[in-house]
Amino acid sequence: MRPELPRIPQATTKRLPLYYRFLQSFHNAGHKRVSSQELSEAMKIDSATIRRDFSHFGALGKKGYGYDVPTLLEFFENTRSR
C-alpha cells in the first residue's frame, strides 16, 4: 500500500509554473539565493503566500537565508517530470 501524499491546494499547483519561470530568471541573472520578499516583489504575490506554498513541499528554505535558487530549480524540475 502506497503512503498517502499530502494534498496540495489547487491554487498552489496553479502557481508552480510561475515559480519555476521566475526562479529561472533569477538563476539566469546569477542569483544563488532569493528571499520570499524578493520573489514576492518580482511576482506580485504576497510573500506569506509563497512561504505557505513552498511549505507544502517540506523545508525548502531557511529563515534569514531564503531559498537556494539552484536547489529550488532542481526541485521544481523533478516535480514537473512526475
Image (tube, rainbow, N blue to C red):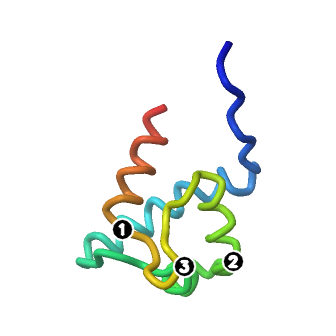
Circle 2 Cα neighbour tier, 10 Å, few/some/many (<14 / 14–19 / ≥20): few
Q: Which residue is depicted at the point 43% across and 81% down?
A: 65
Residue sticking out furthest to the top: 1
Residue occupying the point 53% across, 79% down: 63
Disc 2 + disc 3, Cβ < 8 Å:
yes
Q: Is residue 70 above or below residue 43?
A: above
Q: Is residue 81 above or below residue 44?
A: above
Q: Give the Cα distance between marks 2 and 1.
A: 18 Å
Classify mark 3: residues with Cα within 10 Å, few (<14), some (14-19) or many (20+): many
The residue at 29%/75% (across/down) is 32
- Under mark 3, the amino acid is Ser
Helix, strand or loop at disc 1? Answer: helix
Residue 73 sits in quarter: bottom left
Q: Is residue 49 left or right of residue 28?
A: right
Position of residue 29 in the picture relative to residue 12 (left or right): left
What amino acid does circle 2 point to? Ala
Q: Which residue is labeled 2 in the image?
A: 48
Q: Position of residue 51 (x, y in %)?
A: 63, 70
Mark 1 lies on residue = 69
Give amino acid for label 1: Val
Residue 34: x and y in percent read: 42, 78
Q: Is residue 68 left or right of residue 60?
A: left
Q: Position of residue 11 (x, y in %)?
A: 74, 56
From the top left corner, tell me how far across and down residue 38 is, in percent.
Answer: 49, 85
Residue linked to disc 3: 36
Callout 1 touching callout 3 (CB < 8 Å): no
Occupied quadrant, residue 54: bottom right
